[in-house]
Amino acid sequence: MEVENNNNLPVKFTEKRKATDEDEGDVTKRLKHDVPNNLDPLTTASSVSNSTHPPPQSPKKRLQIQKQKPRQNKDQNFMYGNYKHYYGKRILDKDFHDIRLDVLATQPELFQDKQLLDIGCNSGHLSIEIAKRFNVKSLVGLDIDRSLVNDAQMAIGSLKRQNPPGSRFPYNLRFLQGNYVLEDDVLLEIERPQFDVILCLSVTKWIHLNFCDAGLKQAFRRMFLQLRTGGKLILEPQSFDTYKRRKKLSEKIRENYNAIELKPNKFTEYLLSPEVGFATMELMGVPDHCESGFKRPIQIFTKRLVDNDS
């Protein structure tokens, strides 16, 4: 997929998704044999004169054989975690309710009247709920998958038809497509603070697998630079043991997986180091999800206050 990069606005990963990033079934096997490609549907049985040739087949049968295609590894469509139906596993009831909202709701003041960025917003369901429930000033949802962003934009269009102009929601929302990882670290030099809160929920694994340590480190530094003084990074990292089953998505991902040194258990140390610069980390909470794979700690990293700078 082509990935556009917007250097003025950050962008997310995310996941067309039929399963969650924890639904780690075996990858569909390719067909063992290639389909013959030298069959001519216009050739008639009477033209086969060599007795060593296989028995002639009807033109209809030969056309059917020609149309057969090797199966594709469908998971390769989701190599950025951009699953189409990601929220199917997150939602526990008929109405939308991502269980992480319960954790975020413990500190609603972090979001009220604030400007937010949601990296890897997928189809936008969680972003929409955050903007609605916590009365945010603005929220930008960013995802690497254009079709998911289109879905999110369509949802906003529908909500706008139901809500008159003048109300804050849903006019406090917009969705953009792009890759949050920049082409070169030098582009970090033009980053400026523009958000009060950055959400990076269940996205680090996909940045890590696709762009290895260098890409994830750059993303962390970009998050820091885009936050205003006193701003918050709300991070929900996946554990490293969930990476293994996705390393077969591509040869590049396999190479990145084998080269990873910055494991998730070292993220806090790195984010608090001088290389990034966050001042503190606190545990916001752990979603009480029915599936253990989604019980991931949600952390808050705070950018140092001006009063504390020396």
Image (spheres, rainbow, N blue to C red):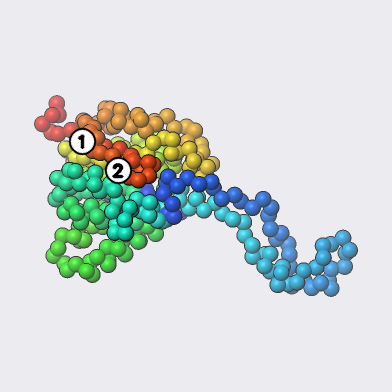
Residue 103 horizontal/vertical position (percent)? 24, 44
Residue 248 horizontal/vertical position (percent)? 52, 42
Q: Is residue 137 above or below residue 212?
A: below
Q: Are dots 2 and 1 in contact, CB under 8 Å?
A: no
Say which element carries label 1. strand
| Viewport quadrant of the C terminus | top left
**Residue 306 seen in the figure:** yes
Q: Which mark is residue 129?
A: none
Q: Is residue 136 left or right of residue 191?
A: left
Q: Is residue 126 left or right of residue 171?
A: right
Residues 310 and 249: in front is 249
Q: Is residue 36 left or right of residue 160?
A: right
Question: For the residues marked 2 and 1, what is the alpha-carbon distance in whole angstroms?
Answer: 24 Å
Q: Residue at x 14, y 63 (%)?
A: 167
**Residue 188 seen in the figure:** no
Q: Residue at x 21, y 30 (%)?
A: 279
Q: Nearer the viewer, mark 2 or mark 1?
A: 2
Q: Amino acid at mark 2?
A: Asp
Residues 17 and 69: in front is 17
Q: Quadrant of residue 43?
A: bottom right
Mark earlier in primary sequence (2, 1): 2
Q: Amino acid at mark 1?
A: Thr
Q: Residue at x 30, y 43 (%)?
A: 288
Residue 145 horizontal/vertical position (percent)? 39, 54
Q: Which residue is the site of mark 2?
A: 288
Q: Is residue 185 above or below residue 157?
A: above
Q: Residue at x 37, y 49 (%)?
A: 14
Q: Which residue is the site of mark 1?
A: 302
